[in-house]
């Protein structure tokens, strides 16, 4: 197994929802969304292609960093991808990140500007 690849004994993708136009995937940590190696298991989109076989043309609608786990939408058709991307572009979709912290905390809320995002 290539260094940094998610475990091969896991399912190709962990499907939360699937229909004719959409895959909703639970992306594990330590898996990149787009290919960086030749290994068919090294990226989420490659695993989606394996899951679908010849059915559909998977296109990532959103992505998460390698270090982040969470929900990723994969359109199965170009039409679904366009429609879903329009929702993001028009502000109908919001992302929410939740962190699990071990140990004590000194503040109830983390200011996004203080954390480096604006």
Image (spheres, rainbow, N blue to C red):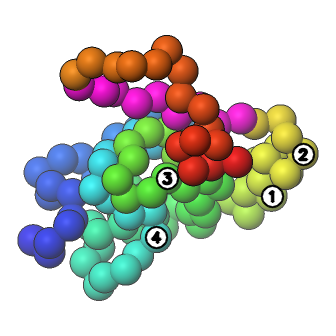
Task: Give the Cα separation between the discs numbered 3 and 2.
Answer: 20 Å
Q: Is residue 111 above or below residue 108?
A: below
- Residue furthest front as drawn: 106
To which quarter of the image does residue 82 belong?
Answer: bottom right
Residue range in magenta is 94-102
From the viewer's perspective, tell me whether residue 3 is left or right of residue 87. left
Badge nearest the viewer, 1 or 3: 3
How many residues crowd mark 1 within 10 Å: few (<14), some (14–19), many (20+)?
few
Identify the residue under disc 2: 90
Q: State whether residue 16 is above or below residue 116.
A: above
Which comes before the other along the chain, label 4 or label 2?
Answer: 4
In the rendered structure, which disc, 1 or 4, sits on the residue that comes first in sequence?
A: 4
Pick whichever of labels 3 and 2 is earlier in the sequence: 3
- Residue receiving disc 3: 64
Badge 4 is on which residue?
34
Q: Is mark 4 on a helix, strand or loop?
A: loop
Crowding at mark 2 (Cα within 10 Å: few <14, some 14-19, many 20+): few
Residue in the picture at 45% in, 57% down: 65
């Amino acid at each position: 197994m290539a260094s940094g690849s998610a475990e091969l004994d896991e399912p190709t993708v962990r499907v939360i929802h699937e229909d004719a136009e959409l895959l909703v995937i639970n992306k594990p940590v330590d898996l990149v969304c787009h290919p960086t190696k030749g290994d068919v298991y090294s990226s989420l989109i490659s695993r989606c292609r394996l899951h679908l076989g010849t059915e559909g043309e998977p296109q990532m609608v959103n992505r998460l960093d390698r270090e982040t786990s969470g929900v990723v939408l994969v359109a199965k058709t170009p039409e679904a991808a366009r429609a879903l991307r329009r929702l993001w572009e028009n502000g109908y979709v919001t992302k929410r990140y939740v962190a699990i912290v071990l140990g004590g905390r000194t503040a109830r809320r983390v200011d996004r500007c203080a954390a480096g995002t604006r």
